Amino acid sequence: MTIAWVFPGQGSQKIGMANSLVELPGSRDRFELASQILGRDLWKICNGENVSNEETFDLNDTRNTQPALFVVESLLVDNLKSQGRKAQMVAGHSLGEFVSLYSAEVLNVETALLLLKKRSELMASAGGGSMIAIMGFDRNELNDLIRETEDAAIANDNSDSQVVLSGSPEAVKKVADNLKCKRAIPLNVSGAFHSIFMTEASNSFSEELDKVNFNDAKLPVLSNVDPSPALKGSILKDRLKKQMTTGVRWRETMTVMQNEGVTSLIEIGPGNVLSGLAKRSMKNVLINQVANAADLGY
């Protein structure tokens, strides 16, 4: 059996998502480390507690969402590994790519959290754009509209029937209004993620990445900007540098996994977004979810 572990990104978070993990080995220490790095109590944030004298306490604030999801997903990874569970390849959706790099031993916990603190702050400050999820559309018509519309791009190419547009509010609305589709849902985000609107933030984050050593991966990693399997740390770092301004190629990621012979896909983290996409796009693949401690014995 060829197993792929996949890790969801922003949008999968929910209040209480860490509650079942409290007794897992290393859980308290990891939350304490993350809280020290962030300068606020991440455990309380995950529980939806309104922390006095703290400006940033909302779990849906990207400055909290990113490290919180990383901590939850990385703890689940550690406990799967402690059971002797292994994957033959890994991939993560946007923020989830950091968990995939951790699971492949490219980055350690502290380094990943330090990078995510910087990444989330940069993304939170890069406003001025919007994002809209589109479902049920003609791919050729969408591509034509994107080509014709300046400041609009496909941020998340999730499947044949689901994408997320990103760019200026006027541009993404124009594409959505002119595209024949089943649904168009504006997303509550602080900026136009995975688009040219992230260029300044991306450049600053690249400088941070240059200060960090990326180990060679212990198993193939499929990156968002290039889903071909890679092991070399320098290649994975270069791909991550481009992630903020480039669309997440998840539709192609699922195709690569099937072409590589994946027969079992495990979504590790809260929610079921990636599992749902896989069920509709990957045929004859066994799909499981590990969202909390109770799922570790799947």
Image: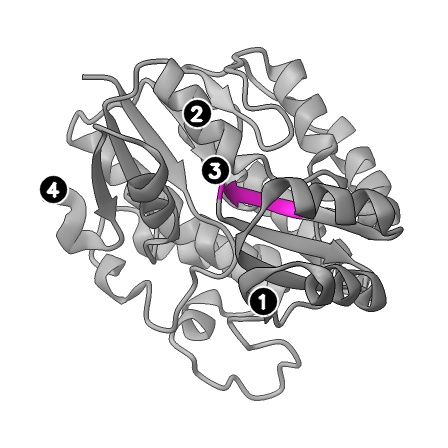
Closest to the camera, between mark 1 and mark 2, is: 1
Badge 1 marks a residue whose secondary structure is strand
First in sequence: mark 4 vs mark 1: 1
Using the numbered discs, state the Cα–Cα distance from disc 2 to disc 4 in whole angstroms: 25 Å
Using the numbered discs, state the Cα–Cα distance from disc 4 to disc 1 in whole angstroms: 35 Å
Closest to the camera, between mark 1 and mark 3, is: 1
Badge 3 marks a residue whose secondary structure is strand
The reply to whether the C-beta atoms of the residues labelled 2 and 3 are less than 8 Å apart is: no
In the image, 154 versus 55, the foreground residue is 154
Q: Which residues are magenta?
A: 155-160
First in sequence: mark 1 vs mark 3: 3
Badge 2 marks a residue whose secondary structure is helix
- Which residue position holds label 3? 92
Circle 1: residue type = Ala
Circle 2: residue type = Thr
Q: Residue at point 38% right, 75% down?
A: 47
- Which residue position holds label 2? 255
